[in-house]
Amino acid sequence: MSVQLKDVAKHLNISISTVSRVLNNTGRVNKDTRERILKAVKELGYQPNEIARSLKRKSANILGVIVPDLSNRFYAKVIKGVEKIARENDHSVIVCNSDEDIQKEEEYVQLLLQKQVTGLVVATVGGNMELFEQYNKSGIPFVFIDNLPQTQDDFDVVTIDNVKAGYNLAKHLIDQGHEKLAIITGPQNQSTAAERLQGFRKSLEESGFPVRDQWIGIGEFKRESGYTIMKDWLLQDELPTAIFAANDYLLYGAIEAIMEKGLSVPHDIAAACFDASDDTGLVKPQITSIIQPAYKIGSIAAEIIMRKEKKKDLKMFEKVVLEPTLIINESSQNFIRKR
């Protein structure tokens, strides 16, 4: 159950009206009492119910979704999955874009909790464990997708096995005859980036090939990072024969740099990534890619929230791990340029 005004008052052994005056900034309350109340509000995870204030009703029938990049088609598909289940259960959806910004993510969490949403689906930017603890105190179910908290035991999670997916993608490139593999990935405080790198390393090590530190590129999950990292590698005397990118933006940036150099994919450098976003088949070469079941991730996350709303049981947590799919295309064909 969510923390109520009366719970804060009982915790401090003061009247509900005193707590209300402080939170609504009305009437006079001495400084010490005010500070005690504000501290207790934070510790207990109390969130004022704005909708109850204005409409005098308990349930908002809204699912909140917070993602780091609305322009990313993976998240667009996740949101469609959430929306389908929400509408089937007479709920609306509010979508917030954190822009890979921890502070914006926290502000959106606070905003949605104040609106007493039924539950939240969050692809976190990562690293803010204090904020995650506040989630658990809110009395509102949270389901994490894609980027996950470092500690997952106390949260509902819907994801893929990113280590396995990274392993399989690297193994495919190795099976094509490549020995000199490079990886471009995202911030290592984000689970997706770290786990895909882990799978990449494991695949090379098991195949007996070196993991070269100079060919591990870490940046943001953005096209600019892929371009900059690849541009630097192209200045070296020795080049990788294949590029593994942790998302499609990184890969498209890398391909841009490769083409500027007068080289091509796959004839000079092979390439593969996660979640290649071209569904038309018009982009050439078509990209070998790990495809996540984004729509299914969103729908399962919403289903978990709906079940919790009905059962009122927030203490049992689900971890759903879905299978990714490897789609093999032209970009990783078996061709090694002699050097």
Image (cartoon, rainbow, N blue to C red):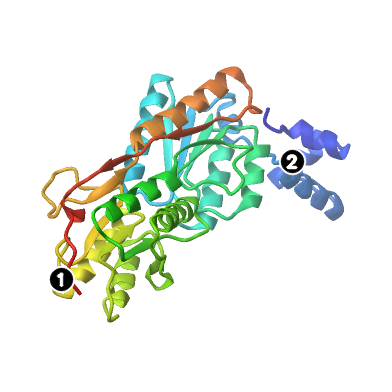
Cα gap from disc 2 to disc 1, whole angstroms? 59 Å
Query: Alpha-carbon neighbours of circle 2 within 10 Å: few (<14), some, or many (≥20)?
Result: some
Q: Quadrant of the N terminus?
A: top right
The x and y percentages for residue 203 are 40, 53
Which quarter of the picture shows residue 56?
top right
Observer-nearest residue: 18 or 225?
Answer: 225
Q: Amino acid at mark 2?
A: Leu
* Nearer mark to the viewer, of 2 and 1: 1
The x and y percentages for residue 153 are 62, 38
Q: Is residue 312 above or below residue 216?
A: above
Residue located 27% across and 73% down the image: 239
Q: Is residue 10 above or below residue 313?
A: below
Is residue 82 at least partly visible in the picture? no
Give the numbered dot on residue 162: none
The residue indicated by pointer 2 is: 44
Q: Is residue 313 left or right of residue 40?
A: left
Badge 2 marks a residue whose secondary structure is helix
The x and y percentages for residue 172 are 29, 50
